[in-house]
């Protein structure tokens, strides 16, 4: 009894999807722990239990694989911030705290804020980050920023400005000799900035 063609195709698709998922997971571990330069496609293929040919089947080159990992980490960071419990009570402060805490995790620190700008370029990194964060930033700004600032600047422009400040802050922390001390100082400055942008207390 022969297997229907659509069933064969489905099995092939499932196998391909599983292989791609395994490659992304292996690459993420390598890029987070040892960085882009020290990671080879042979390392990734070996960790994923597949061949280097399988890597090239799913990704054009190492940079394309890194880009896919960058997208995954960026999307997860924004989703984590969006799920912060106190986000509805004090949106600006809660989002900032969540961002700084999770931005210090190995994957974010190495992939997003250390290697990302060098491998992909600042413009491409910003485009990816904007794609995943703009909706959340717009909601936070709309709920907290003073109406006159929204009217004069526009919500999208404010969101992109704040994203640039947050990303630059994370990059400073990532390269600091004493990250925790640097983060405490930066957090204080950013908190004051949020207060200055906020609606006046009623």
Image: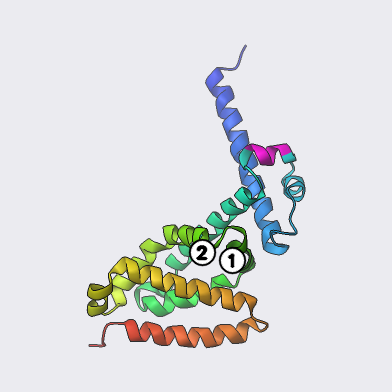
- Which residue is rendered at x = 27% and y = 82% of the image? 199
Q: Which quadrant of the rendered structure holds the C terminus?
A: bottom left
Image coordinates for residue 52, horizontal then vertical, percent:
73, 41
Residue 76 shows in the view: no
Residue 187 inside the magenta-drawn segment: no
- Label 1: which residue? 108
- Label 2: which residue? 77
Q: Main secondary structure of the magenta part?
A: helix
SS state under label 1: helix
Lateral position of residue 192 relative to residue 12, left or right: left
Is there CB contact under 8 Å for labels 1 and 2? Answer: yes
Q: Nearer the viewer, residue 11 or 142?
A: 142
Q: Nearer the viewer, residue 22 or 159?
A: 159
- Which residue is rendered at x = 73% and y = 62% of the image? 34
Label 1, label 2: how far apart the Cα atoms are: 8 Å
Lateral position of residue 130 relative to residue 49, left or right: left
Image coordinates for residue 178, horizontal then vertical, percent:
66, 84
Image coordinates for residue 123, horizontal then vertical, percent:
50, 61
Q: Which region is colored magenta?
A: 53-57
């Amino acid at each position: 009894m022969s297997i229907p063609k659509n069933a064969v195709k489905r099995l092939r698709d499932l196998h391909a999807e599983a292989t791609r998922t395994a490659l992304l997971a292996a690459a993420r571990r390598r890029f987070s722990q040892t960085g882009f330069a020290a990671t080879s496609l042979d390392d990734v293929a070996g960790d994923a239990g597949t061949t280097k040919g399988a890597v090239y089947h799913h990704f054009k080159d190492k940079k394309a694989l890194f880009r896919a990992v960058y997208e995954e980490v960026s999307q997860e960071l924004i989703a984590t911030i969006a799920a912060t419990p106190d986000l509805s009570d004090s949106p600006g402060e809660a989002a900032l705290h969540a961002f700084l805490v999770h931005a210090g995790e190995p994957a974010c620190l190495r992939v997003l804020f250390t290697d990302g700008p060098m491998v992909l370029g600042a413009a491409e990194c910003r485009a990816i980050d904007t794609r995943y964060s703009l909706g959340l930033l717009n909601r936070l700004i709309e709920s907290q920023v003073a109406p006159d600032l929204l009217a004069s600047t526009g919500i999208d422009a404010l969101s992109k400005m704040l994203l640039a400040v947050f990303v630059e802050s994370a990059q400073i922390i990532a390269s600091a000799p004493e990250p925790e001390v640097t983060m405490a100082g930066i957090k204080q400055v950013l908190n004051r900035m949020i207060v200055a942008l906020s609606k006046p207390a009623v």
